[in-house]
Amino acid sequence: MSISITLTLNGVAREIVLDDTRVTLLDLLRERLALPGTKKGCDRGQCGACTVLVNGRRVNSCLTLVATLDGAEITTVEGLAEGGELHPVQSAFIENDGFQCGYCTPGQIMSAVGLIAEGHAGEDLERIREGMSGNLCRCAAYHGITLAVREATRRMAAEDKGEVA
């Protein structure tokens, strides 16, 4: 039995027909919609490489069934940049060397965007580390990632106030 759902993916409304209701969001993104930015890591929700935003909240897409997302707004790393300009978190990751092999980077970036939006980032590096603890980096780029999240938080707060960051 197939079902049809509607969702908004990176700002574009999409109708999705599922022949199998067990399809995960990760597999939909990578295998059917050709959005390879979201990475398949552990496939058990332990590494965070597959992190995306669903209705603005961080989720492990490997554990999320597409059938439960009717009407949802989904943002992947491909949907962050606007008009060819990187999102402040993406820029901060580059400037702070927040990646090494880059495999975990999309999930780290999406988790950072969610963390900042939740208001749980800020200046305290330990608090940022705790908030990002669901995302694992095999290359140990944690120091750069933490600095990038703090820098992006500063920039986004300055932009919200109309200040130049």
Image (cartoon, rainbow, N blue to C red):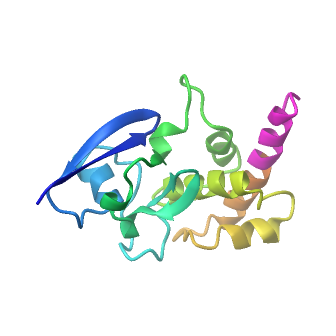
Provide residue 31's location: percent of width, then percent of height. Answer: 23, 52
Would residue 57 be found to the left or right of residue 102 on screen?
right
Foreground: 120 or 106? Answer: 120
Who's the residue at 45% across and 40% down the image?
78
**What residue is drawn where x is 79% and y is 54%?**
150
Question: Going by the picture, which residue comes out furthest to the left?
Answer: 1
Residue 119: image quadrant is bottom right
- Kindly identify the residue that appears in the image at 69 percent across and 44 percent down: 92
Q: Residue 98: name its quadrant.
A: bottom right
Locate residue 107 relative to residue 150 in the image: left or right: left
Q: In this view, does 13 lie above or below 50?
A: above
Looking at the image, the residue that sits furthest to the top is 83
Instruction: Give coordinates of residue 88: x percent, y percent.
Output: 68, 39
Q: Does the magenta stretch include residue 77?
A: no
Tell me the quarter of the image containing the N terminus. bottom left
Main SS, magenta region, reads helix
Q: Is 104 on the left or on the right of 163, as rendered?
A: left
Quarter of the C terminus within the rendering: top right
For the point 44% across and 74% down, which residue is it? 45
Number of disc labels: 0
Between 143 and 122, the residue placed more toward the observer is 122
Q: Where is residue 80 in the image (x, y as percent from the top left)?
A: 54, 38
User: Is 160 covered by the magenta stretch?
Assistant: yes
The stretch in magenta equals: 152-165
**Where does the image place residue 105, in percent across and percent down from the top left?**
53, 55
> Which residue occupies the foreground of this view, 110 or 63?
63
